[in-house]
Amino acid sequence: MLEKEYYAQKFEEKWMNKWEETNPYKALNNSDKPKFYALSMLPYPSGKLHMGHVRNYTITDVIARFKKAQGYNVLHPMGWDSFGLPAENAAIQHGADPETWTLENIKYMKQQLKRLGLSVDWSREVTTCLPDYYKWTQWLFLQLYKKGLAYKKTAPVNWCEKCHTVLANEQVIDGKCWRCDTEVTKKNLSQWFLKITEYSEELLNDLEKLKGWGDNVKTMQHNWIGKSKGAILKFKVKEIEGLEIPVYTTRADTVYGITYLVVAPEYPDIEKLTTPENKEKVEEYRNNAKKLSEIERLSTERIKTGVPLGTHIINPFTGRVCPVLVADYALVDYGTGAVMAVPYHDERDFDFAKKYNLPMIQVITGDGFEEGKCYTEKGTLVNSEQFTGMDSVKAREEITKYAAEKGFGEFKTQYRLRDWLISRQRYWGAPIPIVYCPHCGEVALEDKDLPVLLPKDVDFSVQGKSPLATSESFKYTTCPKCGAKAERDLDTMDTFVCSSWYYLRYTDANNDKECFNRDIVNKWLPVDQYVGGIEHAVLHLLYTRFFVKALRDCNLLDFDEPIKNLLTQGMVLKDGSKMSKSKGNTVDPDDIYKNYGADTARLFILSDSPPARDFDWTDAGVEGCYKFLARVYRLYSKFEGKIKLEYNFDVKNLSKHDENLVRQAHIAVKKITNDIENEFQFNTVISRYREFTNSIYDYIKDENSINYDVLSFALMTLLKLISPVTVFMAEEIYSALGGKGSVHNLPWCEYDENLAKDSNITLIVQVNGKIKDKIEAEQGLPDCELEKLALASPKVQELTNGKTVVKTIIVPNKLVNIVVK
RNA sequence: GCCCUGGUGGUGGAAUCGGUAGACACGUCGGACUUAAAAUCCGAUGAGGCUAAUAACUUCGUGCCAGUUCAAGUCUGGCCCAGGGCACCA
């Protein structure tokens, strides 16, 4: 029996528990049905679910349920990205064990997810901080290592003083730590890197294959990879025999305009290039540069400074002798760390040359060129000997060719992308499975030695070095090669390594022999629909693409891209601004479950805004959705006992009144199906629910004229349409009406194209493109009939009277436009 | 500076192909029911003009300016603004 009024709290938990017992959402690794892999970005177990999670997982859940109803074998898994700093910081602050803290959070949040009614196959749950998972993270690291894709090197790396660890380039946002906003400094450390740059070209080219990704994400990755085509040119140093300075340039066409050369303060040969009389000034300059923060140094506003080194280069094209200077506008880690300066045709060189009174030579001219002003556009070469008169774009090619022939240059493609630094000086991560032996050096562990378990006897409070160094039991081991006493690597891996392959593990989550079975992973991948936040555009979403390509080359799987379709959902705002604890405008999902039920939360978070846009959470909106659910529920409650699960009618014999409702049902099915298939426009889907519900209310206004077969058809259609969104209410109603099994196992509704439109049309009558009349007419009248109808309109006659009809435009079933003079 | 996304009522947002701009809601106002309130149900709601009028009619209206077209929120060109990304990248 249904209650008289909708009260979600009475039945939501009942169904949650029932589904827990029966696991109706189990995905099968062998099924005849076509597969559909619906994936959400896995949560970090921070303690409680927030509304961003609710939005993310509701979207994925509705997609998964829709596809299931359409007959797909759906894989919709969930897991925990559970290594990372917050657990460790909690350990430091409250003396808790990071593992206990994390697992407790998982337990709580898992309950919250279940309460949200997700159709997740929990038998495939993955927890990245547990040994049965990180064993395979370590194993995969070793595969990359063996393939030469993981290497250790000493380099200046990004250091966050607050997090006490290094960061990857992608984790530095505007010179600050992505996690805590602390300004990042540089440190020289020996660290592990993954060779993502080996895949620069493929990562860039394959973006084109990703038709199901938004342009915003693709452009971000495109910019991040930052490909540019140019040339390396080598300049002999006049004072030092055998020493050359190579530069990278995209403007080889301007070589005849070079008047000086600039090297970065960290340029390796800088000391050789400095003459004794300049030594003091140069060192002072370099020390100052070191002190400048990354943010200051990267500011384009800053006035450019530099000092001469005292040495010179000879321009091989002109024989001209040009001074070499150090200036911090040259960057050591891009190109060669040295820049050829052509002040007349480069803004930066221009500013710098003006400040220090360095000479300028014009070598390009073109439209908009002005004497004495910097000209950076394309044009025609001047003052360039045999290249004078050549188009500048062509000259780039020709001059580089010339340089190559003469042996002082070559073509060069440059990328901005850097290798991925994955060492972290923190405890709560997967240990790096490498040991250092005094005899054998760097040695990879063997498979049988995995996992390298995290030790418990650790002092978390150490700062500036890895906490693992404080564990004697962990630090010392024996060399797998020679058995001598050896030391382990004391860093852990970036958590983004763990999250780069979790969705592969879902396909075969309980396999304890392999990280995943090759056939199974090939079968499920690529992910058909991935849903998550845009903030991972150049983090997770780039790393994971690299990972799959690397694992393919390690011969572990057979596809090139992991994600076929990507939906990046917008943020959840509260009353127009970002939800945050400091502003005190957060909404706790538990409160919503308690006061309105999970169905209301699900319905509301999908309404109002399309998924990709930001969503504004308002109390009034929640209230409105709750009322709508109550309105739907009342329909079923009111007619309980009269609603038939099996109904029977022939549309041809129905009254206009009945036929109209049947049509409204078919229209609703058609539009809702299309809206979901067309970029998951759930906001309009929910509008259609309301429209169709309003139609049913219209239909029942006169209780005496109700045909219960027709009404049952409409109500059962509505129930099925709404079931992916309001999962509990749909099940409750279906069960109360005596439905067998679960409403969530019913197939999706079909529609009849002929019935999915109104029987009549409103013909729009225009005169000279302006609407003058609207006429009710039958569907499908021929053009000549429509024209007759339009011309018969009194208003049209009034307006055409005494004028000539030039032409008539007819759009079938829609519009007639009469053009008069 | 370069790139991406967007700009529609008081608000969130609708509008396959160029073909009724503002679906569906929120809000507001009014009505029914009620002793009263809540809930519910019904109705009005882009701006202006004309009007006794809520009827009829009419003008304007999708960031701005042009253009194409019988017809433009939608297409083309040029701008403006907002949000996001990249950037002393040579």
Image: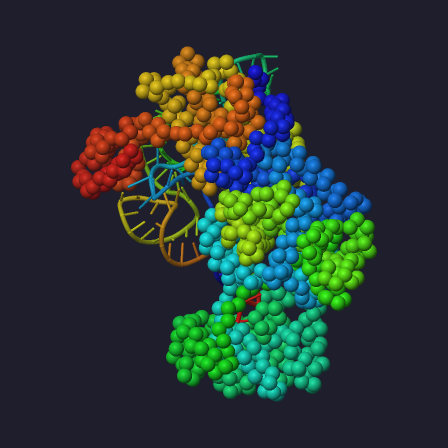
Could one spot residue A734 in this view of the protein? Answer: yes
Q: Residue at x 52, y 28 (%)?
A: A744
Question: Vertically, is A546 above or below A785?
Answer: below
Q: Quadrant of the C terminus of chain A?
A: top left
Q: Position of residue A798 (x, y in %)?
A: 22, 33
Q: Nearer the viewer, residue A162 or A103?
A: A103
Q: Residue at x 52, y 86 (%)?
A: A320
Task: Residue A779: name its quadrant.
Answer: top left
x, y percent for residue A665: 41, 26
Q: Name the quarter where the N terminus of chain A is drawn.
A: top right
Image spot of residue A567 (x, y percent):
52, 45
Query: In this rendering, is residue A110 above or below A698?
Result: below
- Front-most of B16 and A379? B16
In terms of image quadrants, where is residue A307? bottom right
Lateral position of residue B66 relative to residue A95, left or right:
left
Query: Residue lying furthest front in this view?
Result: A482
Q: Is residue A736 left or right of residue A423?
A: left
Is A131 situated left or right of A775 in this image? right
Q: x and y percent of residue A595 in the render?
A: 64, 28
Image point (25%, 38%), residue name: A810
- Say if A72 sits above or below A215 in the image: above
Left or right: A467 as drawn, with respect to A200:
right
Mark yes or no: residue A59 visible: no
Foreground residue among A312 and A748:
A748
Q: How was this image coloured?
A: rainbow
